[in-house]
């Protein structure tokens, strides 16, 4: 406590929201389901460095792209989990994973193995599987009439689940064969979402794990255990079935634990599988659903996507009701659609409340040429959503304008000096530096392939039950990843009647 007061004295010169609890400090993030938006409000109100406290932890929130560029590449800083909530999500022993571990020897070997699985050559080899998952989804959507309401968030998470099943674990999850919540994939998705929600609640409320008498905590615990048992099934299958050489599973099985020199045992393998399973479908599925939402509100944007698809012969027409199958070579040619995806990831970054760093040397860290001195023991919070929405970093930050990404240098911050020989980035949906998203090549490929195929055959109209843009805005929820609490209910209207 005395240390916390001492550290507070060192950061109190920075502006920040008043504490709303003498003991807990700033509890506002724990009370808002859209805490990603709260961090933006603070950035716009208090500036690029905002001070806050939670219990005995002093935190500086930074949205200055130059400081972020330096911090995320600094060897003096490391990831440091404030809570073990995500470790508890990943496995019963609550061990650190590829996502949460400090940059230890074990993290290095796991990162290297997984990164190899995402090589361009492997992605190219997996491209037909990605295309097939979406084609299957299109067949299911064709059986649903335009009057019916479809939850495209659920449908697109299913599509991403099939992709990670194939690419990651060499397994046909069968998720896009139906849209019924009761099927095996529906149950796995429900368990993942439930366990993530419990993890998110524990992350923002460290006392929650001790409140075992509460019914909602017991339910969260039960669904987390169910998630672990589904993941154990996946691990057992990996060990039995000798997954394809290029899969993430094969790469995970080939890892030698630097501490024992032996392959990873289940205690260590299961949390890595859980993390990759969750990160593999939740993030990409929700992002694709945000694209469907954003495009449904901007007909002029959809018209340009349609024109691009037509020019590439990827659009369903009365003469050609099934467009030609999309090819690997088409992906870079989808210039406008790729800009739409980027603009959606700017406004709705799936990992929007990430990321945290702390000094790993026990010494203060000077950043931004002295603009910020991070005292050892103070947390550094670099919230992606806030960077993407702050006035001054972007022009009209709340407007959905894909065209901004057609301009050269659009991803770089303006009017800031270079850091280590390059312009600091202001567009960081996958984070940057050594701890950036290891699955981003797959995520990008899946998003472009899937959305090109979907818009080639369908147009999507937001269902009335979503309550229009206000209803969607009011239902934004960060449950580790960003989604809409109502799902994304739409009418899927085929471009060409069957
Ligand atoms: C649109 C999709 C995705 C987005 C927006 C996204 C975003 C991110 C972000 C922001 C981070 C940094 C998190 C932090 O610093 O705390 C991250 C890390 C990570 N992502 Fe993704 N991700 C996506 C898809 C994927 C996929 C498809 C996979 C795997 C199949 C994946 C696996 C991971 C892993 C394992 C890490 C931790 C890497 C490390 O710390 O070494 N992600 N992702």
Image: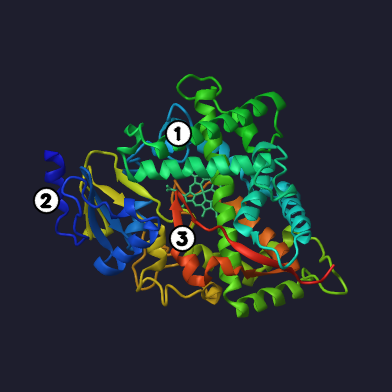
Q: Which of marks 3 and 2 is nearer the N terminus?
A: 2
> Label 2: how many residues lie within 10 Å, few (<14), some (14-19) or many (20+)?
few
**Residue at horizontal 77 percent and vertical 70 percent from the top:** 315
The label on residue 221 is: 1
Q: Residue 476 carries which label?
A: 3
- Mark pair 2, 1: CA separation: 39 Å
Occupied quadrant, residue 188: top right
Does 377 sit above or below residue 395? above
The answer to whether the residues at label 3 and label 2 have Cβ atoms under 8 Å apart is no
Which residue extends farthest bottom? Answer: 300
Q: Nearer the viewer, residue 419 or 77?
A: 77
Residue 460, position in %: x, y?
A: 66, 69
Residue sitting farthest toward the right: 319
Label 2 sits on a secondary structure element that is helix
Mark 1 or mark 2, which is nearer the start of the sequence?
2
Q: Which residue is drawn at 69% across and 68% down?
A: 333
Lateral position of residue 416 relative to residue 322, left or right:
left
The residue indicated by pointer 2 is 9
**Is the residue indicated by label 3 positioned so its CB lies within 8 Å of ligand 1?**
no
Mark toward the start of the polypeptide (1 vs 3): 1
Question: Residue at left 61%, top 45%?
Answer: 118
Counting from the top left corner in percent of width and height, residue 17 is at: 22, 60
* Residue 205 rendering spot, x and y as whole percentages: 32, 43
Please give the name of the residue rendered at 42% of the width and 73% of the height, measured from the top-left corner. Answer: 397
What SS does tag 1 mark? Answer: helix
Mark 2 vs mark 1: give the one in front: 1
**Disc 1 and disc 3: Cα gap in Å?**
24 Å
């Amino acid at each position: 406590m005395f240390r916390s007061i001492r550290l507070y004295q060192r950061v109190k010169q920075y502006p920040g929201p008043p504490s709303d609890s003498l003991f807990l400090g700033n509890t506002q993030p724990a009370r808002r389901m859209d805490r990603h938006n709260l961090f933006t409000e603070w950035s716009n109100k208090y500036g690029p460095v905002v001070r806050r406290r939670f219990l005995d932890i002093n935190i500086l929130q930074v949205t200055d792209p130059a400081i972020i560029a330096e911090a995320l590449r600094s060897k003096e800083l490391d990831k440091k989990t404030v809570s073990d909530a995500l470790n508890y999500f990943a496995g019963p022993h609550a061990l650190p994973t590829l996502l949460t571990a400090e940059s230890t020897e074990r993290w290095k070997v796991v990162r290297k193995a997984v990164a190899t699985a995402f090589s361009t050559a492997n992605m190219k080899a997996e491209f037909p599987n990605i295309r097939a998952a979406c084609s299957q989804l299109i067949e299911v959507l064709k059986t649903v009439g335009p009057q019916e309401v479809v939850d495209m968030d659920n449908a697109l998470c299913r599509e991403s689940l099939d992709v990670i099943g194939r690419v990651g674990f060499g397994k046909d999850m069968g998720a896009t064969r139906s849209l019924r919540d009761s099927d095996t994939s529906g149950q796995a998705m429900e368990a993942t979402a439930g366990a993530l929600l419990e993890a998110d609640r524990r992350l923002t409320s460290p006392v929650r794990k001790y409140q075992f008498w509460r019914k909602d905590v017991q339910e969260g615990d039960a669904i987390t255990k169910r998630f672990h048992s589904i993941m154990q099934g996946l691990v057992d299958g990996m060990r039995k079935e000798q997954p394809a050489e290029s899969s993430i599973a094969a790469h995970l099985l080939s890892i030698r634990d630097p501490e024992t020199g032996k392959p990873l045992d289940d205690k260590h393998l299961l949390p890595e599988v859980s993390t990759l399973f969750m990160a593999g479908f939740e993030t990409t599925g929700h992002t694709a659903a945000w694209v469907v939402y954003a495009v449904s509100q901007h007909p002029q944007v959809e018209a340009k996507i349609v024109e691009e698809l037509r020019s590439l012969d990827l659009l369903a027409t009365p003469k050609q009701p099934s467009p030609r199958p999309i090819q690997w070579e088409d992906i870079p040619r989808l210039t406008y659609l790729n800009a739409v995806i980027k603009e959606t990831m700017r406004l709705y970054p799936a990992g929007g409340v990430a990321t945290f760093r702390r000094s790993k040397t026990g010494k203060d860290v000077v950043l931004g040429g002295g603009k910020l001195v991070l005292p050892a023991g103070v947390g550094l919070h670099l919230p992606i959503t806030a960077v993407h929405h702050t006035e001054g970093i972007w022009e009209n930050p709340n407007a959905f304008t894909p065209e901004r990404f057609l301009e050269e240098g659009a991803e770089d911050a303006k009017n800031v000096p270079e850091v280590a020989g390059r312009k600091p980035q202001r567009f960081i949906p996958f984070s940057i530096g050594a701890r950036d998203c290891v699955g981003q090549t797959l995520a990008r490929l899946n998003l472009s392939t899937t959305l090109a195929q979907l818009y080639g055959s369908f147009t999507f109209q937001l269902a009335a039950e979503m309550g229009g843009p206000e209803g969607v805005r009011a239902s934004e929820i960060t449950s580790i990843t960003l989604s809409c609490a109502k799902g994304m209910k739409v009418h899927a209207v085929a471009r060409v009647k069957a």
